[in-house]
Amino acid sequence: MYDIRHRVGIKAPQHRVYEMLATKEGLAGFWSIPEGDSTVESPDERVRWRVVDGVPEWVGTTLTFELKQDGGETVLLFTHADGREPTEILHHSSTKWATYLIGLRSGLEGGSFTAFPHDTPVSSVWR
């Protein structure tokens, strides 16, 4: 199994970051409208999504967003877990997740969110 991991510090209240991660409407603001089900494991601290449709290599994987306060910012620890093989889509997805999380931070800190289709392309082959 292969995982993607990122850490981003966000200058926004933890509950606001949580709101963006815990609902399909929130995720659509900085990523895309997800196909999956969320599980709230710990309000304002952890959200887990299980991918049930979409990119074939993602189906059956889990997205986990863990939140904590540190030095005046909300720290987001992101894990996209249970990738079956280290294929090119895993490499692409890692880069894309970094751009999505930076877009989330930008929007929450007063800039603009950059959700699909306005996100940053990293390849002419895959969005």
Image (spheres, rainbow, N blue to C red):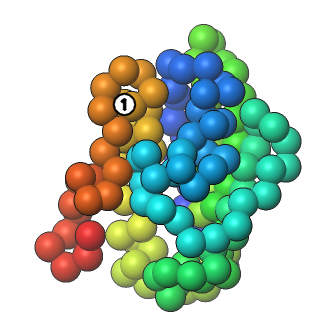
Q: Give the SS element for disc 1.
A: helix
Q: Is residue 123 left or right of residue 101?
A: left
Q: Quadrant of the C terminus?
A: bottom left
Image quadrant holding the N terminus, namely bottom right
Q: Residue furthest top?
A: 72
Q: Position of residue 92 (x, y in %)?
A: 35, 70
Q: Which residue is outermost to the right? A: 42
Q: Specify whether residue 65 is in view.
A: no
Q: Is residue 102 above or below residue 1?
A: above
Residue 91, quarter of picture: bottom left
Q: Position of residue 76 (x, y in %)?
A: 60, 37
The answer to whether any part of residue 77 appears in the image is: yes
> What percent of the width, then of the height, locates residue 66?
70, 42
User: Label 1 crowding class (10 Å Cα cut-off): few <14, some 14-19, many 20+?
Assistant: some
Residue at 43%, 46% in the rendered image: 29
- Name the residue type under label 1: Ser
The x, y position of residue 47, in whole percent, is: 72, 49
Q: Is residue 117 above or below residue 14?
A: below
Q: Which residue is depicted at the point 50% across and 19% down?
A: 11
- Would you say 112 lies left or right of 49 here? left
Q: Residue furthest front?
A: 25
Given residues 7 and 55, the one toward you in this image is: 55
Residue under the image location 72 percent in, 60 percent down = 38
- What residue did someone put label 1 on? 106
Give me the residue at 68% from left, 55% from top: 64
Image: 99 above or below 108? below
